[in-house]
Amino acid sequence: MAVENLPDFTRPARQRWESIPADIRQRLLANVWCGQCRHEVTITNFTGTIKGGDLLLVGKCAECHGDVARVIEG
């Protein structure tokens, strides 16, 4: 998955996301808790918005395809 191609990010979310070093972004994407799988998974097909000053990534679990989210505190 190309992390650099993010069509569903709001402008502020994209700016915040791009301010994070690429290696850290990869680790954040691979460290998302899935409530169905009950362990850390990789988030796929995600979108990004800013909520309450934090970056919120919402997408799908790479294993079970259930809904997952990742908050990156601002």
Image (spheres, rainbow, N blue to C red):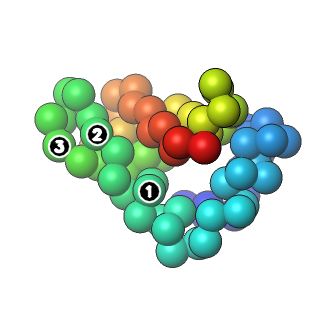
Residue shown at 53% from the left, 63% from the top = 25
In the image, taking residue 35 as reference, residue 24 lies left or right, namely right
Mark 3 → mark 1, Cα distance in angstroms = 14 Å
Mark 2 → mark 1, Cα distance in angstroms = 11 Å
Mark 3 → mark 2, Cα distance in angstroms = 6 Å
Residue under label 1, please give it: 28
Task: From the viewer's side, name the closer residue of 32 and 51.
Answer: 51
Label 3 sits on a secondary structure element that is strand
Instruction: Examine the rendered structure and indicate whether residue 4 appears above or below residue 42.
Output: below
In the image, taking residue 56 as reference, residue 64 lies left or right, namely left
Q: Quadrant of residue 65?
A: top left
Residue shown at 44% from the left, 56% from the top = 28
Q: Amino acid at mark 3?
A: His
Instruction: Determine whether label 3 and label 2 are within 8 Å by CB.
Output: yes
Sequence-earlier tag: 2 or 1? 1
Instruction: Examine the rendered structure and indicate whether residue 34 appears above or below residue 17.
Output: above
Residue shown at 73% from the left, 42% from the top = 13
In the image, taking residue 53 as reference, residue 66 lies left or right, namely left
Q: Amino acid at mark 1?
A: Leu
Task: From the viewer's side, name the closer residue of 64 and 67.
Answer: 67
Residue under label 3, please give it: 39
Q: Quadrant of the C terminus?
A: top right
Sequence-earlier tag: 3 or 2? 2
| Residue 53 coordinates in the image, percent (x, y) | 66, 33
Label disc, if present, on residue 68 of the rendered structure? none
Q: Nearer the viewer, mark 3 or mark 1?
A: 1
Residue under label 2, please give it: 33
Circle 1 packing at 10 Å, graded few (<14), some (14-19), many (20+), is: some
The residue lying furthest to the left in this view is 38
